[in-house]
Amino acid sequence: MRIGFGYDVHRLKTGCKLVLGGVYLVYEKGLEGHSDADVLTHAIIDALLGAAGMGDIGRHFPDTKQEYKNIDSLILLADVREKIKLAGYKIVNIDSTIVAQAPKLSGHIEDMEKNLSIALQLDCTLVNVKATTTEGLGFTGIGEGMAAYAVALIDSL
């Protein structure tokens, strides 16, 4: 068994869409990035790649390539799932945390887990998403950006 840790952060900006775990949220700002800037999915991708010793999201999907411009991060996650399988591993489970002061995310967590589990071809009970604030502290607390952490467990096929 192998464990990987992922972390991602994106700036919040007016005029951008807000996508978390493949769920489009209505909010005054969205996350800025080359792809859809889905900070949660990106953290999970990095956790999976790290567990398999395969580098990070930037190595596999560089922001210098136009083919990844505005791409749905769930497509990238499904691609990583296949890379993990080809490397001789199966995904056991995912645990993740979104760090954001606003908007309120509790009503969207189940949909995020569903989207992620579909992309990973895992039972929903094996994909856990949590959300927390930083009590107004730091860049997430003052609404400049969002962050996400993820841990992935993989095992040999």
Image (tube, rainbow, N blue to C red):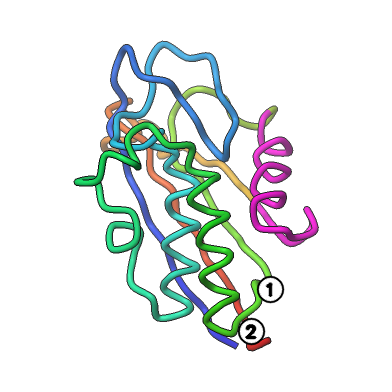
Above-or-below relation of 63 to 104? below
Residue 109 counted in the magenta span: yes
In depth, the one of 137 and 52 nearer the eye is 52
Magenta stretch? 108-128
Residue 65 counted in the magenta span: no
Give the SS element for disc 2.
strand
Determine crowd level at label 2: few under 14, some 14-19, many 20+ residues with C-alpha closer than 10 A.
some
* The image quarter in which residue 140 lies: top left
Above-or-below relation of 72 to 52? above
Q: To which residue does mark 2 refer?
A: 155
Q: Amino acid at mark 2?
A: Asp
Q: Position of residue 65 (x, y in %)?
A: 25, 45
Q: Earlier in the sequence, mark 2 or mark 1?
A: 1
Give the SS element for disc 1.
strand
Which SS type dominates the magenta stretch?
A: helix
Above-or-below relation of 64 to 12? below
Q: Position of residue 121 (x, y in %)?
A: 72, 58
Q: Position of residue 77 (x, y in %)?
A: 53, 53
Name the residue located 47 percent from the left edge and 58 percent from the top edge: 45
Above-or-below relation of 64 to 49? above
Q: To which residue does mark 1 refer?
A: 92
Name the residue located 65 percent from the left edge and 51 percent from the top edge: 119
Q: Quadrant of the N terminus?
A: bottom right
Q: CA distance from mark 2 to mark 1?
A: 7 Å
Determine crowd level at label 1: few under 14, some 14-19, many 20+ residues with C-alpha closer than 10 A.
some
Q: Position of residue 14 (x, y in %)?
A: 30, 13
* The image quarter in which residue 78 lies: bottom right
Left or right for 71, reference 14 = right
Q: Amino acid at mark 1?
A: Val
